[in-house]
Image (cartoon, rainbow, N blue to C red):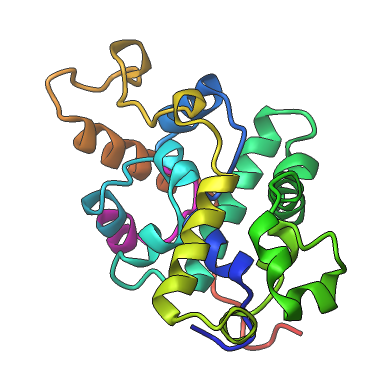
Amino acid sequence: MPPHQTLFDEASAHLPLFDDLSQATIDRLAVGGYGRGLLTPPLRARLRKGGFAHMGALALATPAALMAVRKVGPVRVGAIRAHILDELARRLPGARAMHDQDATDRRRLDRLRTVPVAALCLVPALVERFGAAGPSWADLAALRRIEVARALGITAAEVDGIVSALVRAVLPDPQCMPLPRTMREGDTPCGMDMGKTEAELLRERDREWDEAAPERHAPSRHAT
């Protein structure tokens, strides 16, 4: 784990790319497959093999789960998030302001501020830093792993437990979370064979998007 990362950064790796999306929005993202220009065909195939068949599934995926797919690292996770945000902005007014990374982080920290950490006010180092009222979960999340371990005198495994607690505190009620559904009969593009599997339908849709995209020309050597 990079030394500059906070507990919030660690927890965010195990939280969905997007919060507060409705089931209808997830369904519309799913119908779009991967959209236009998302990564390369081999990477799209790896994502599908990893269980992320369309943008709806990607929007609900965690960075850690995506980076478990071969050749998908932090840069590509950022590209995937930007790609989905562009698609949301096309469909939902105000989506960019509501769902960009900064807004999502602020919303999550606001949730953490409502969770008291009463027991931690007994730790002198934290009282000195945050006052007698003690820190909130948001204060704790802003600390680095080594700071928390030293202040509380706990092991790395116990710090992992705090990160897991941060994730649970931020996650919405599982009963309220949308699900990445499979394509339904009404979603099947015109001209596609209903006997094909969902994966085949989505691959065919990807080919159609790629063929419809403007052709990319290599720049001329004389171009300025």
The answer to whether residue 13 shows anywhere in this view is no
Q: Is residue 201 left or right of residue 116?
A: left
Q: Is residue 163 magenta?
A: no
Front residue of 213 and 30: 30
Front residue of 146 and 16: 146
Seen at 49% across and 32% down, the residue is 29
Residue 45 image offset from top left, x and y in percent: 26, 55
Q: Quadrant of residue 205?
A: top left
Seen at 54% across and 75% down, the residue is 218
Residue 36 image offset from top left, x and y in percent: 49, 46
Q: Residue furthest top?
A: 186
Q: Quadrant of residue 126?
A: bottom right
Residue 211 image offset from top left, x and y in percent: 41, 46
Q: Is residue 98 left or right of residue 23?
A: right
Q: Residue furthest left?
A: 195
Q: Is residue 35 left or right of residue 137?
A: left
The answer to whether residue 41 shows anywhere in this view is yes
74 vs 99: above or below = below
- The magenta-colored residue range is 34-45
Q: Where does the C terminus fall, quadrant-wise?
A: bottom right
Seen at 31% across and 55% down, the residue is 47
